[in-house]
């Protein structure tokens, strides 16, 4: 718990201190956000707002975990977690991909950065490397960081192992590619209003901090704890990472709330989406993540529905997609949309935690 608090505070203060410094640097370089012309006209006043704030978020999360890991190693002799390094690798790599996209936008002075194919190739490389490493490399004895299959809550709903080792690895790589692409795009689509993605990310990572912390206190090999025990590798480090992500988003929200002084950009949204996806894999809760991050699912699905309906029937289901723009065009003030979406995500996060805890009670036979 002490390491968790240390990591949380380091990430929080790093963001609070680092963000205004980044704002001044970006202002000096004249790297401002370019706003899409077909969006709500009220957004045009945001043109030129500093972007790439995700740099501070990513670095704060890494610094928070690193300091807590050093404290645990020095004070308790706890070994450094390779599983945590892999999770942070996904976040950092996706953040770099997003930074390249953001930098291309400000250099070209338009709202288009990397091509779709360029982003896709980058995501495929990152997801493939992560999938192979987390599945193949042993970390503690014979344990690996993930299972070759689709997990609900520690249990494998669909196993790939019947396909043989090579077949299981190939199918698992495809599955991880899907997860990473889905979550990074969902977070990226949600980053359309001041504080929307930041606040919802904070809520989602609060839920994951609880999930990983509970797993850490009920992991296989701890005889003092009754009930179901999880087979997750290094859940304490995963809880600390989730807590650091929550703290970084909380600190960044001080500057990102309406009217935003800085945007996280693709640097932040892709990094946070990648981190959320990696945490779901490392904690063996890939399907549960769809509940915990329910608001992000709604945002992504609204875009899919809008595009599909227009291509098939040439009609628009929403006034504009993603769905937060639909409510803006219905007359809702931006602040009202953001706060109400936070409330929806809070309900999804609470529901996800409730599902997780209920599953533990059922597996522990404590309900009867």
Image: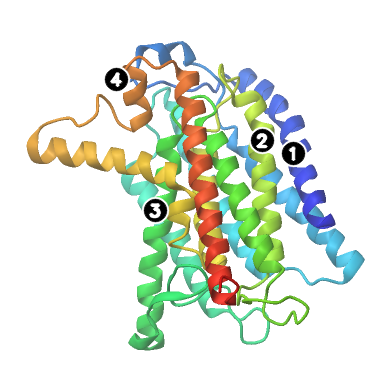
Which residue reaches farthest front? Answer: 368
Q: Give the distance between the C-alpha atoms of the residues marked 1 and 3, in whole angstroms.
A: 28 Å
Q: Which disc number belongs to residue 12?
A: 1
Nearer-N-terminus badge (1/4): 1
The residue that label 3 is drawn on is: 181
Q: Residue furthest right?
A: 75
Label 4, on which residue? 38
Image depth: mark 1 or mark 3 in front: 1
Left or right: where does residue 92 sit relative to residue 79?
left
Q: Position of residue 97 (x, y in %)?
A: 49, 46
Q: Tell me whether the residue at label 3 lies in contact with that at label 4, contact meaning CB atoms closer than 8 angstroms.
A: no
Q: CA distance from mark 1 to mark 4?
A: 36 Å
1 or 3: tag closer to the N-terminus: 1
Q: CA distance from mark 2 to mark 3?
A: 25 Å
* Residue marked by disc 2: 250
Instruction: Pick whichever, 232 or 182, lies toward us.
Output: 232
Please say if 260 is above or below 79. above
Mark 1 in CB contact with mark 4 (< 8 angstroms): no
Instruction: Say whether disc 2 or disc 3 marks the residue closer to the N-terminus.
Output: 3
Left or right of 201 in this view: 226: right
The reply to whether the C-beta atoms of the residues labelled 2 and 1 are less than 8 Å apart is yes
Where residue 173 appears, as percent x and y from the top left, is 40, 70
């Amino acid at each position: 718990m002490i390491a968790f608090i240390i990591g949380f505070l380091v990430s929080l203060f790093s963001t609070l201190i680092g963000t205004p410094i980044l704002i001044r640097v970006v202002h000096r370089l004249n790297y401002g956000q370019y706003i899409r012309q077909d969006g709500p006209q009220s957004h045009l006043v945001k043109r030129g707002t500093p972007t790439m704030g995700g740099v501070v978020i990513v670095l704060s999360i890494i610094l928070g975990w690193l300091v807590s890991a050093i404290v645990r190693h020095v004070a308790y002799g706890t070994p450094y977690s390779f599983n945590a390094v892999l999770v942070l690798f996904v976040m950092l790599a996706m953040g770099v991909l997003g930074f390249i996209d953001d930098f291309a936008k400000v250099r070209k002075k338009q709202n288009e950065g990397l091509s779709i194919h360029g982003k896709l190739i980058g995501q495929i490389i990152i997801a493939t490397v992560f999938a192979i490493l987390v599945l193949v490399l042993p970390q503690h004895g014979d344990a690996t960081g993930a299972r070759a299959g689709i997990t609900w809550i520690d249990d494998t709903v669909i196993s790939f192992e019947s396909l043989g080792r090579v077949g299981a690895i190939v199918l698992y790589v495809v599955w991880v590619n899907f997860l990473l692409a889905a979550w990074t795009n969902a977070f990226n689509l949600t980053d359309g209003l001041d504080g929307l993605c930041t606040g919802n990310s904070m809520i989602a990572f609060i839920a994951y901090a609880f999930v990983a912390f509970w797993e850490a206190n009920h992991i296989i090999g701890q005889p003092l704890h009754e009930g179901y025990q999880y087979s997750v590798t290094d859940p304490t480090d995963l809880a600390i990472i989730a807590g650091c992500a929550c703290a970084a988003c909380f600190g960044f929200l001080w500057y990102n709330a309406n009217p935003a002084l800085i945007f996280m950009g693709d640097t932040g949204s892709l990094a946070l989406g990648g981190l959320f996806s990696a945490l779901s894999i490392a904690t063996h809760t890939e399907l549960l993540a769809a509940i915990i991050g329910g608001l992000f699912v709604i945002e992504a699905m609204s875009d899919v529905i809008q595009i599909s309906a227009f291509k098939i029937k040439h009609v628009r289901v929403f006034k504009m997609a993603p769905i937060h723009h639909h409510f803006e065009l219905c007359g809702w003030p931006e602040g009202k949309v953001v706060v109400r979406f936070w409330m929806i995500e809070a309900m999804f996060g609470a529901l996800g935690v409730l599902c997780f805890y209920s599953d533990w009670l059922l597996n522990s036979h404590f309900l009867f």
